[in-house]
Amino acid sequence: MSAKNLSTVATDLIESYGNTAKHVINAYRAGGERVVSLLEQRWNRALKQSRTELTAETAKNASAAQVAFSVYYTKGLMLTTNGAQHVVSQLVKVAEAGVERASANASLFEEKTGVTTLNTLAQATAPGALALSKLAAQIEQKTAELASKIAGDQATAAKRKTAFSQRRTAKAA
């Protein structure tokens, strides 16, 4: 196996790790959305149970506070997960470019010097890199399945109403 082939395996490995990280981020996002949904349900149940004891203004303020909390939490969740996705994408690009550059430099070094030590090293490490790449692909697949399970019906169902649209609907009513 040449240094070029080793670089291909390394690039595939980097991409697999990047995809795994993105799956974990998606699972975090889906879990956060579930938390918002559960908190909204619990808040609404508690408000409904105590509505007879509250004035109309207090109930209205409690509903508005719940919507505001949901807005900020959802906005923060989206900002952090989108930012994390972007960071992972950039890290993958940089790492892949580094591997390609190292491979090109190794080939030039061998060409200029006639020493094939780097090619021998690439051949020796290739089986381990290939095994690691296969393991990373399995991990990537499992994290995709877990992220899908965590997302549940949210992944296939229409997007839930955002807190912004809920607030507009509440104001219109």
Image (tube, rainbow, N blue to C red):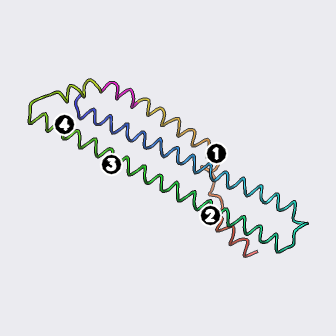
Q: Earlier in the sequence, mark 2 or mark 3?
A: 2
**To which residue does mark 4 refer?**
106
Asked whether 169 or 163 is in front, the reply is 163
Residue at image location 53% in from the left, 44% down from the top: 24
* Residue type, mark 1 in image: Gly
Q: Which residue is mark 1?
A: 152
Q: Amino acid at mark 2?
A: Tyr
Nearest to N terminus: mark 2 or mark 1:
2
Q: Nearer the viewer, residue 97 or 12?
A: 97
Estimate how packed mark 4 is, as few (under 14), some (14 to 19) or many (20 or more) residues with alpha carbons within 10 Å: some
* Label number found at residue 108: none
Q: Which mark is residue 94?
A: 3
Q: Quadrant of the N terminus?
A: top left
* In the image, residue 84 above or below residue 19: below
Distance of label 3 from label 1 (alpha carbons): 33 Å
User: Residue 158's spot in the image, x, y percent?
Assistant: 63, 56
